[in-house]
Image (spheres, grey):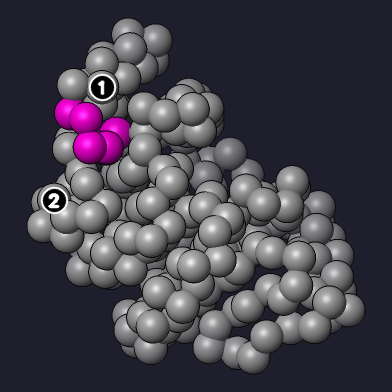
């Protein structure tokens, strides 16, 4: 199992620790991934098996993007979600709201400040996946380190390019620990789903 960083941007797409891919190769990879999704759809039972007993940390979970992600995750999977952000009261209110709408009390709240590594470590304790829906690009390394320390994979929807060198500085560690890191997942509509599906074939179902 190899560590993986996928950057969803116009040019280039980086799959670390490989070299950058030129635009032509990138377009070929996009088409290949799209065909992969179409030809090998995950069965519902496979998704639930892969997600069983998993806990996601959703950083920025009470913001606009987080509020879009939470109901989809609760509806389509059986994971537990830890809504996190700097304002614990907002996180608690969001958790209470989603637990009223979906059965099982699968949403909990925790305070996490991306500028505070210790709060991130506590928030990431016992989680399996870090999903970043907050505007915290300058603290991407803090979040990535906390994810690695908890043995979690990582996906963000942040576009600022300033985070790329911060994530790349941890590429060797990601590779050694076999973690999957996907950044800028929301930049190209439809591509994120293909990349997540591709990563799922190599990481989630083989554990």
How far from the left and from the top, in percent, is residue 49? 44, 47
What residue would you read off at disc 2? 119
Image: magenta residue range: 82-88
Which one is nearer the viewer's eye here, 133 or 52? 133
**Tag 1 or tag 2, which sits nearer the N-term?**
1
Residue 105's place in the image compared with 19, above or below, is above
Answer left or right for 47 relative to 138: right
Q: At 58% from the left edge and 39% from the top edge, which residue is drawn?
A: 44
Q: At 42% from the left edge and 73% from the top edge, which residue is drawn?
A: 167
Residues at circles 2 and 1 in contact by the CB criterion of under 8 Å = no
What residue would you read off at disc 1? 90
Residue 140's place in the image compared with 5, above or below, is above
Find the residue positioned furthest to the top: 100
The quarter of the picture where the N terminus appears is: bottom left
Which one is nearer the viewer's eye here, 93 or 166? 166
**Across the whole image, how many numbered discs are drawn on residues?**
2
Q: Callout 1 environment at 10 Å: few (<14), some (14 to 19), or many (20+)?
A: some
């Amino acid at each position: 199992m190899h560590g993986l960083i996928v950057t969803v941007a116009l040019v280039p797409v980086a799959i670390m620790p490989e070299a950058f891919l030129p635009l032509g190769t990138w377009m070929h990879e996009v088409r290949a991934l799209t065909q992969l999704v179409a030809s090998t759809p995950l069965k519902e039972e496979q998704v639930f098996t892969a997600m069983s007993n998993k806990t996601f940390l959703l950083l920025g979970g009470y913001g606009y993007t987080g509020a879009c992600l939470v109901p989809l995750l609760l509806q389509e999977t059986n994971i537990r979600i830890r809504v996190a952000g700097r304002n614990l009261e907002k996180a608690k209110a969001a958790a209470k709201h989603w637990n009223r709408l979906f059965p099982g009390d699968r949403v909990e709240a925790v305070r996490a400040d991306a500028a505070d590594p210790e709060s991130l470590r506590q928030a990431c304790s016992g989680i399996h996946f870090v999903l970043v829906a907050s505007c915290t690009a300058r603290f991407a390394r803090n979040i990535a380190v906390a994810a690695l320390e908890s043995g979690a994979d990582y996906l963000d929807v942040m576009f600022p390019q300033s985070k790329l060198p911060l994530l790349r500085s941890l590429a060797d560690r990601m590779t050694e620990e076999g973690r999957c890191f996907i950044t800028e997942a929301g930049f190209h509509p439809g591509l994120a789903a293909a990349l997540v599906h591709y990563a799922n074939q190599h990481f989630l179902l083989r554990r």
